[in-house]
Amino acid sequence: MDIRTFLKNNIVVLDGATGTELYKAGLKVGEMPERWNITHAQTLIGLHKAYYDAGSNVVSANTFGANSMHFNDAELEEVIAAAIRNVKAARDLSAGTQEKFVAADIGPTGKLLEPFGDLAFEEAVGVFAKTIKLCAKYGAEIIFIQTMNDSYETKAAVIAAKENCDLPIFVSNAYGKNGKLMTGATPAAMSTMLEGLGVTAVGVNCSYGPDDLMGVADELSECSSLPVIFMPNAGIPKNENGKAVYDLSAADFAEGVKKAVMRGARIVGGCCGTTPEYIRLLSQAVKDIPAKEITPKRLTRISSYSHEVRFGFKPVVIGERINPTGKKRFRQALVENDNGYILKEGVAQAESGAEVLDVNVGIPDIDEKTVLPEIVAGLQAVIDLPLQIDSSDAVAMERAVRLYNGKPLVNSVSGKKASMETVFPIVKKYGGAVIALTLDESGIPETAQGRLEIALNILKQAEKYGVNKEDIIFDTLCMTVSANPFAAQVTLDALKLIKEKTGCKTSLGVSNVSFGLPDRESLNAAFLTLALGNGLDMAIINPFSAPVMKSVKAFSALTGKDANFTEYISFAAKNEIAAAPTPPAHTGEVDGLKTAIIKGLKDQAADSVKKLLECTEPLAVINEEIIPALDTVGKGYEEKKVYLPQLLMSAEAAKAAFEIIKERSAAKTGSVKCDFVLATVFGDIHDIGKNIVKLLLENYGFNVIDLGKDVPPEKILDEVVKRRAPLLGLSALMTTTVPAMEKTVALVKSRAPWCKVVVGGAVLTEEYANKMGADKYAKDAMETVRYADGVFNGSIG
Amino acid sequence: MCKTEIKTYSGAPVDYGEVMRYAGAKKTDADLKTLIDDCLTECEKENAVNFAVCFTETPVTVKNDETDLSVFTLKSKNLATALFGAESALIFACTIGIGIDRLIKKYTEIDPVRALVLQALGAERVETFIEVFIKDYEKTRGVKLSPRFSAGYGDLPLDAQKDIFGLLNPQKNLGLTLNDSLMMSPSKSVTAFAAINGDRVNDKCGCENCGKNDCGYRR
């Protein structure tokens, strides 16, 4: 029988611990337990058999750490073949009459994924793929992904499983005391992503005993349409005379798990500290409990690395600002790889109340296939909002959706055959929700009925691709009223009709409606209120627009969707502050840009530069105000009169001023001197110093290419060669990473002899620097700037 | 066996002086204190500081410059000195988690001053919590611990990290991982040895014990 069939009407009993049992049998600390599959096959078979005898339906093979991070290819295959063979042998030997299955146990790699660790997402997929392929080859019947505490690594494993076998996929994660994964995901977020990816069951294992994990299991049962796995430890380990002892007895453990089954858990077993005896009692305890029916929840939801967003409860704001259309400064940021600018747009939208961010980077001058995934990776590292991947380039879309950490919203598919053929397979494979535009080959129908027909066709096609109805969100297309006075009404009618007839959620980009008319915000806000009244679930809007945001908040307040008016009240309070006339920030200090920069006052610097630009040339502002101010601060720092945070604040104020000059003079500031490649060397993750150097160099007009920290020598060389950069800065903070710096300097000097290398960092001295062949030792950021200026203007050869 | 224990600590008060020292600031900088408080509030809101430690005790034998920790042996004169005279040693790995790394990464792009303060705060947090853990350990077990000693100190190579990770399994216990470069992720993390009741238990910790007198971070 297939486990999926068995699951329909039965409680599934898993096995208990393998690791802790092997330690009891003599496994040494530091020894790979998987080698025992070959060297101690009888021990393993005995243990697996004991679990089947105790009543387990599923026994996991000893493959938790069997991956290419720990074994070479040949040994990996041997270890996995033996692991599966052992479980099968145990199954044959066991006298138990229950249904019995063999699972492959897929544990974490032990590495953290980029950008916070050093394992690339695709590398992780590759590691899991190798293991999963072998497990399937040797006859595993379930891929059981366990104990992962990071949503991103979990996704890598699931994708590897989907791409390398057709076996059912069980996923259970290790949640912390706060009920979240180590990297921040709630159970609801995990179930959103995993259900989207199409796994067979979701759950929780390890970390704590049954009582402490009950909340996680409850949350999963509440929102998931999948069977819930519950596999706690035998309580918490206590040290008794140098031995780890778990504090729950087998009977108490079984009682705890039984409680979870009564509340809806369907797949139960034990993790660390549990033994065949625990499973025997557990199996008895749950044997007569009827399997609770799992009801489909039919939720329309997406997720980020941390939380889920559900649609249909109250209006959801999707921030539209990460989009280059009509934004000169944004386009420039894209062309120049200025990810900081784009990130700022994202953060500001989140602060203004956006709950999802649309990400669109489609301009002709960049390679969207590379840039879109990069921007998505950058945003999801630091912003916890789910993203809406917005692209008409199928390759860019697939790449971005694949490495997205959660369940994305895809924007968009339409009723055109070609569009559905491209987009639906992506949505199905990577488990997204998708915005569906009600247009097709013959255009946008002029009637609501016409748009409904397209919607119905889209649903029919989606079903063929296995995309769930609740993952389709209809956009009934908002047209410009100035071109057709009835356009808005048709959109609203279509919205209402489609929602009624299909039960699907709806979305609109609102701003289009007012195109060509004055005071667009008022029209947008009014239209949005109408749309919300007609059943709109989410709006793609500008969260910086107060009238539009007011409309959203007021609607929720007036329709009982904002309990106690908490959101409305806090929004109103914020608005009042914003609307009040701003008192001069620093009274009495009106003496201009120079002072603002010296004092590190960002806002004042921005204001002053605006005033100055009315009557002064940008270049003069830079040379006569900004640079002298920076010099003053820099000199003060060198003389130890100014401290580091002040130096940074001044640099930031100068940056704010530059930003305005850049905006005003659209790209051409005439102040870029030359490329300066900058990196913290391989093995070193300290980048404070490097970041300060970067900021100051930018202030002084250098185009800094910041390669980040922990950068291999080859990567640094490649960048220097690619740009024929005249300057390279290297930073190292620890004695242990000086050799990596030496290696980098030697490599660059031999292969890119034109490039001047300046080095710095806490452990370096001038003597060291000379010895390794660097051109310059700089003791701080200011000295680096002075040296770079010297090289640029030719005074240093 | 598998006798690694895990503990969590919270609520240790902030040592503003240390944060300012790590940030390269003047100790009396009032504006910076406000900024530190602001960062602390954000850390609380984002639940970005979660100190957890996993640790074990192991018998230790020092012979010349070799330290036999029964689970593995390390060759380092400085480690041998640090553990000399002790019958056993405490080995631990700890982290304040990934949340602070996220905040630092975010502000590195959009507000470098805040990023600097968060860096400093993260360093202070992990150090302060280690002190809390050490004191708790000494008190509950009735022992004295020597100043801690980490891989990368003196002549103890960073390679020792591999042994420590093999022993304590902090990947599973704390979500603390080792990069190929032997740096740790999350970044605000520490692994270390400390002698239990050894000859060095009364030595001073930190800067006072270090020969590099011209160090910018010296207290």
Image (tube, coloured by chain):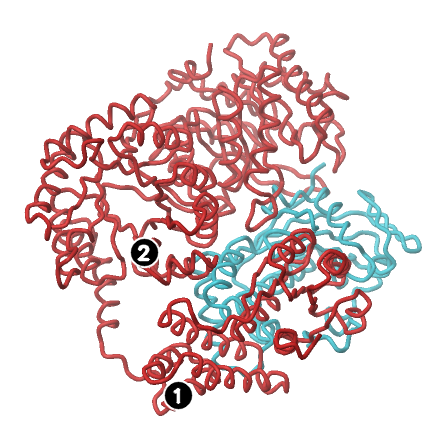
Chain colours: A red, B cyan
Q: Quadrant of residue A602?
A: bottom left
Q: Residue at x 24, y 23 (%)?
A: A460
Residue A519, relative to residue A394: is it above or below? Answer: below
Which kind of residue does numbered mark 1 sit on?
Gly
Mark 1 surroundings within 10 Å by alpha-carbon count, few (fewer than 14), some (14 through 19), many (20 or more): some
Label 1 or label 2, whichever comes before in sequence order: 2
The residue furthest left is: A486
Contact, mark 1 vs mark 2 (Cβ under 8 Å) = no
Q: Position of residue B151 (x, y in %)?
A: 75, 56
Q: Is residue B111 visible?
A: yes
Res. A252 visible in picture? no
Left or right: residue A412 versus residue A402 is left
Query: Label 1 lies in what chain?
Result: A
Q: On the picture, is A482 further left or further right than A408?
A: left
| Residue A522 figure quarter | bottom left
Which residue reaches farthest right? B64
Give the total number of marks visible in the rendering. 2
Residue A623 at x, y percent in the picture? 48, 83
State the SS at label 2: strand
Residue at the spot of label 2: A321
Q: Nearer the viewer, residue A282 or A472?
A: A472
**Given the image, on which type of amino acid does mark 2 rest?**
Arg
Residue B23 screen position, x and y as percent: 58, 73
In the picture, which quadrant includes the C terminus of chain A? bottom right
| Residue A426 marker | none
- The chain letter under disc 2 is A
Q: Nearer the viewer, residue A61 or A301?
A: A301
Q: CA distance from mark 1 to mark 2?
A: 32 Å
| Relative to A2, residue A690 above or below | below
Give the image location of residue B136, x and y in percent. Answer: 64, 59
Residue that badge 1 annotates: A592
Q: Nearer the viewer, residue A472 or A569?
A: A472
